[in-house]
Amino acid sequence: MAPILTSLASIVKQYGISALSAGGAAGSNLSFTATGGIINDYEVSGTFYRAHIFTNSGTFQVGNISSVDLLIVGGGGGGGTGNAGAGGGGAGGFRAETSIPVSSTGGDGSGVYTVIIGSGGGQAGANSPFAGGQNGGDTFWGPPSIPSGYSAAGGAGGRSEAGAASGFSGGSGSGGTRNPAGTRGSGNVFSPTSPLFPSPAPGQGNDGGLGYNGGSYGAGGGGGAGQVGGDASPTEAGAGGNGLPNVYAYGPSIPVMYAGGGGGGARPGGQNAPGGTGGGGAGSNTPSAASNATYSTGGGGGGGGWSSSEGEGGNGASGIVVVRYQIPSSAGSARATGGAISFYNGMTIHTFTSSGSFDSIGTWLPNTTVEYVMVGGGGGGCGAYGGGGGAGAYKTGTTTLSLPFGFPVNIGAGGKSSAQYASTATPGSNTVAAFPTGTITCPGGGGGSAGGSGTNAGGPGGSGGGSAVGGSGGTSTGATFPGTIQATPPAGWGHAGGVGASSGTYGGGGGGGAGGQGSTGDGSDPGYGGDGGTGMQLPATFRDPNSTVGAPGPTSPPWTGADTSGKYWVAGGGGGGPYGLGGSAVPGAGGAGGGGAGGPSSVYFGNPGVENTGGGGGAARTAPNDDAYAGGTGGSGIVIIAYPT
């Protein structure tokens, strides 16, 4: 299950939310329209809109607007794990609301509205191969008085193959196995163990599909926001239910699909199933792990296939919140298309949180110098006193572009976590921008190495993953900092992962970050996992005070070019996990800039890296029953391009 927050105070503590974090003092006379998230301005037939896109938790602070349109999607459930077809994860709940009243005296009394993004559900522990995937986290937008806000339920974790088993319930339900005894999981419900938010409104999602008892023993697909999960047949697993489109983020010319269900898994010889449109991950019919859902869509993870021990399910995707309202006119006129477009300090800024294309239009001026910052996807964290994931490589620089041009921008996904002993989590994917002046690649971060017998080295990457049991930290392709924040060497910034302790509490090493090496794990009692390496602050060009791109970081960094805002940090390493039976050891903290912390004592699963920061996933700690819980997934990367307006 996803971690449960039991009070508003715990929400504020976990996500660092405060009235001041949105860019203005509480109760001040605000001249801006609103702040928070990643800003996108667009026009629809002469009407101008501004969207605030939240892929991470934060705050939305109102200035001089009176109503908003709202999209809110819960985190998708993780796919099931087992030795035959396991059920696809259910998508997170989907809600689209219009004309919600807001004011500068609403929310917490000073115009601040809380945003909590539900995390994607992870996989089951390695010593519990028939356990289901984790439920996705609930997503919330509204004032701190929780019952008066808007929420979307997390999707149900996929049911793992253990004979006939029914799917679980959530925003959308997960797929069942071996029907007729196994039934489909129900949609439109919260887990009874997650009472923090109000009950979901009707229409948030759909039921999962039915499994088939015979043939390839295919499992049902997870339900999607727009469709019931597919039923399995004698020869193939059930497809994930399709999601729904929404236009709030980018307008009707670019509708984005959200909340697709994960495809079911099957035994070899049977056909595995695709995920639903809207980010659902595909199921598996081999010992290979099923596919992760697409980040920041609320999609469900694919169901695992056959393996002699386990066929891992795919990770569910984190949710999203989009807040939209009309503005009198745009602050500028873009001379290119692609990504979310905003205007700050005389610059036009294109922020790519997902893959797309950067294309000139007729108003582009010849020989225009553009400034860019890029981060690769963060590496996954490992299970069982393992190492934290390394951050993706961080690169900044300038180049000159002339008409005409159009080139792809591919955002690296975060690496898949691992629950197994003696294995390394998946590295993050590369972020690539094919500039006409030369393609720039930011390698993904290295995966953390898991505990167990042997000295397991961390995985290599943009920054290296942390190691376990005395193994060497993963190597880095990046150059070591310090330097200046404004520009990087061609290799970018990146650091090696930390070393895991070889005795005692076996604290895993922290993953490397763009600004520093991962820390060494401690073997003394009580011990601790190594902290993730610190990240890097974005260059000043990209520090729009109305936006909250990136993650929190230090307020007094001693580096040339940094400021004291504590905002706009990326590429932090994931924290290491300790063995710590009996609760004596402390997991490592995630590096500033989006690195996920190691598993807390009451939950054991590692925390994911923050999406669109390239942060490494945190490693899990070992539970008292010696189960190997899964680490956190790495955070996806980002590309930001700016030019004079």
Image: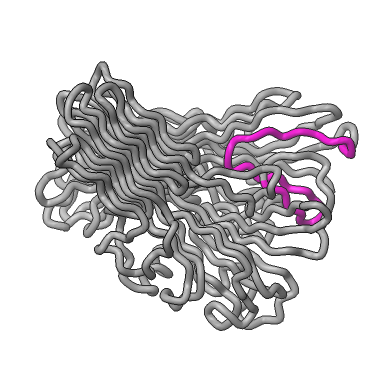
Overall secondary structure of the magenta stretch? strand
* Residue 343 is covered by the magenta coloring: yes
Q: Quadrant of residue 643?
A: top right
Give the residue displayed 43% in from the left and 44% down from the top: 227
At horizontal 40% and vertical 41% (from top left) the residue drawn is 261
Q: Is residue 357 magenta?
A: yes
Q: How many labels does the image show?
A: 0
Give the residue at x 50% y 58%: 95
Residue 8: give x, y in percent of width and height: 39, 73
- Image side of residue 319 versus residue 70, left or right: left
Residues in magenta? 340-364
Tell me the quarter of the picture where residue 372 sits: top right
Of 523 and 337, nearer the camera is: 337
Residue 122 in which image quadrant: top left
Q: In the displayed structure, does residue 468 sit left or right of residue 474?
A: left
Q: Position of residue 228 (x, y in %)?
A: 38, 44
Residue 448: image x %, image y %? Answer: 33, 36
54 sits to left or right of 196: right
- For this rendering, which residue is in front, 182 or 546? 182
Residue 518: tell me if it is visible.
Answer: no
Residue 54 picture location, percent across and down: 55, 56
Does 102 appear above or below 164?
below
Identify the residue shown where x is 87% and y is 32%.
367
On screen, residue 304 above or below 352: above
Closest to the observer, 96 or 628: 96
* Residue farthest toward the left in the current orientation of the protein: 625
